[in-house]
């Protein structure tokens, strides 16, 4: 199969120009003006942008949580991602305490292998770091190509590790050429506030938000930054939401430390007033919770200042019936919301169209930086000769409205119902194959490949 894309406006993190792209097999073979190659398929992209395929490095598909599973499978979730212009996702494997990392990898591969429609990889969440676990890090990095390891500073008794384990893990991960991801919130303080609110009879979704004030995230972020500084381990804070946490990262730059930061599309455009919608607020119960308008301003500024490198989703959908598990108790509402299909269009519409970020910055935070940080660049995350032909053809002027009636995520509501968007994904190409075209998916489950990632050497 070969594809010739004519007259598209190619946008990368560094360039913006009109040219043709010739694809043969799975990779880009030529870029230039008036290319004359004969191709199996020719696409006229006049008047449209061509972006590198989006990379969402924070998703949870078929994730076990609070006695249920997130509702998107590896098939439905990666298909919805493709519809939204995201050609590559990185999911999280959750080690069970008392079990090996390998057993967790086997469990997750049992759900993902031969089921993904788009490309994928994994982070390994370490919930029980000990001498046996320590021995597995090198194998995962060098042989499997899982080079990022997540830690939780919250969810005591299930996922949380203490600072002693964190330091030990950081030292080993640094030695093996990996990266530490962190859920940075103060779990003990949150647990205390949750219990205090419940004892006071405060059971509505609003108290999920009020039990996780900004200080719980700011304090944990500061602590993580200091531990990363001490060990010299590359650190990446997932789903950072607020000004206080961002200032912890800003302060680290004073000592010439580089900490990588991811925020999520919801924290840029939604705010905590949604929790006042009585139980409907459960749609947006996630951890950390939505924050204030001032935090949105800080995050947009952080993107432009280079403090925030990635915009992801933390996609973790649950059916409304599952959310109702917490009808009488906010602490029993499954945490998470659907966004994997909406990220690219919302970021363009709210960011580029409203002049909050440039086109190049859009590509940088939706694709290129994740590829660099997580060891996939330049195979992924850019439009260049020899790179995987992962491309999005995008109409910047087409207006449409987001709705659960139209989305492809396996969930019966939208966190963005009725949201008017400018900019529409028209065609998506994954490794040289047209997988989305004019609203139809042309790829079957099993089309997606596990991407073995390199050691952390491409850090930006």
Image: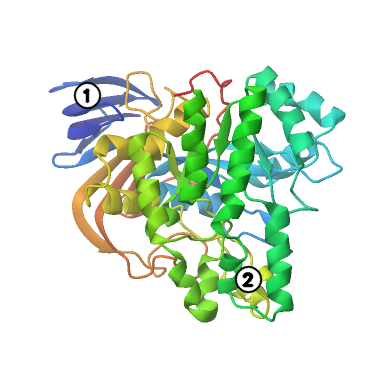
Left or right: residue 395 versus residue 320 is left
Nearer to us: label 2 or label 1: 2
Expressed as whole percent of the image width and height from the top left, the position of residue 163 reads 75, 38
In the picture, residue 197 is in which quadrant? bottom right
Left or right: residue 322 versus residue 188 is left
Visible in this render: residue 60?
no
Q: Nearer the viewer, residue 325 or 35?
A: 325
Lower position in the chain sequence, tag 2 or tag 1: 1
- SS category of the residue bearing label 2: helix
- SS category of the residue bearing label 1: loop
The residue indicated by pointer 2 is 322
Expressed as whole percent of the image width and height from the top left, the position of residue 257 reads 52, 25
Expressed as whole percent of the image width and height from the top left, the position of residue 232 reads 62, 22
Query: Marks 2 and 1, how far apart in space?
Result: 52 Å
- Report the label total: 2
Near mark 1 (Cα within 10 A), the count class, few <14, some 14-19 or many ≥20, is few
Expressed as whole percent of the image width and height from the top left, the position of residue 270 reads 41, 62
Quick one: quadrant of the N terminus? top left
Q: Residue sitting at 59 percent across and 40 percent down?
A: 222
The residue indicated by pointer 1 is 38
Quick one: quadrant of the C terminus? top left
In the picture, residue 134 is in which quadrant? top right
Above or below: residue 385 compared with residue 370:
above
Near mark 2 (Cα within 10 A), the count class, few <14, some 14-19 or many ≥20, is some
Q: Residue sitting at 59 percent across and 57 percent down?
A: 287
Left or right: residue 97 versus residue 40 is right
Q: How is the image coloured?
A: rainbow
């Amino acid at each position: 199969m070969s594809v010739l894309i004519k007259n598209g406006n190619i946008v990368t993190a560094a360039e913006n120009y009109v040219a043709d792209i010739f694809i043969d097999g799975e990779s880009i073979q030529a870029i230039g003006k008036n290319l004359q190659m004969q191709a199996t398929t020719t696409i006229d992209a006049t008047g449209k942008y061509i972006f590198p395929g989006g990379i969402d490095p924070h998703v949870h598909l078929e994730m076990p949580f609070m006695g249920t599973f997130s509702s998107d499978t590896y098939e439905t979730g990666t298909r919805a991602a493709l519809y939204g212009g995201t050609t590559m996702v990185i999911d999280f494997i959750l080690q069970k305490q008392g079990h090996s990392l390998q057993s967790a990898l086997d469990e997750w591969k049992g759900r993902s292998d031969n089921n993904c429609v788009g490309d994928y990889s994994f982070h390994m969440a370490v919930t029980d770091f000990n001498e046996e676990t320590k021995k597995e890090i090198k194998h995962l990095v060098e042989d499997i190509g899982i080079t990022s390891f997540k830690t939780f500073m919250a969810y005591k008794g299930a996922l949380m590790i203490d600072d002693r384990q964190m330091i030990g893990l950081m030292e080993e991960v640094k030695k093996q050429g990996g990266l530490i991801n962190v859920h940075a919130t103060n779990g003990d303080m949150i647990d205390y506030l949750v219990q205090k609110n419940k004892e006071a009879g405060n059971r509505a979704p609003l108290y999920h938000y009020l039990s996780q004030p900004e200080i719980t995230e700011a304090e944990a972020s500061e602590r993580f930054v200091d531990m990363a500084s001490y060990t010299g381990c590359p650190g990446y804070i997932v789903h950072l939401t607020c000004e206080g946490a961002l200032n912890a990262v800003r302060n680290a730059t004073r000592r010439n430390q580089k900490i990588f930061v991811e925020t999520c599309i919801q924290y840029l455009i939604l705010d905590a007033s949604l929790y006042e919608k009585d139980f409907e607020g459960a749609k947006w119960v996630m951890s950390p919770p939505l924050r204030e308008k001032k935090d949105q301003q800080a995050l947009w500024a952080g993107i432009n200042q280079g403090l925030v490198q990635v915009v992801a989703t933390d996609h973790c959908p649950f059916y409304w019936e599952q959310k109702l598990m917490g009808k009488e108790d906010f602490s029993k509402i499954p945490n998470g919301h659907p966004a994997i299909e909406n990220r690219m269009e919302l970021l363009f519409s709210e960011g580029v169209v409203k002049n909050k970020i440039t086109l190049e910055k859009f590509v940088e935070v939706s694709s290129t930086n994740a590829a660099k940080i997580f060891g996939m660049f330049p195979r992924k995350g850019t439009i260049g000769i020899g790179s995987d032909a992962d491309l999005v053809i995008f109409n910047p002027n087409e207006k449409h409205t987001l709705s659960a009636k139209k989305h492809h995520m396996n969930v019966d509501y939208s966190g963005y119902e009725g949201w008017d968007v400018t900019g529409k994904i028209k065609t998506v190409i994954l490794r040289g194959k047209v997988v989305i075209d004019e609203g139809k998916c042309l790829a079957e489950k099993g089309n997606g490949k596990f991407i073995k990632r390199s050691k952390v050497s491409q850090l930006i």
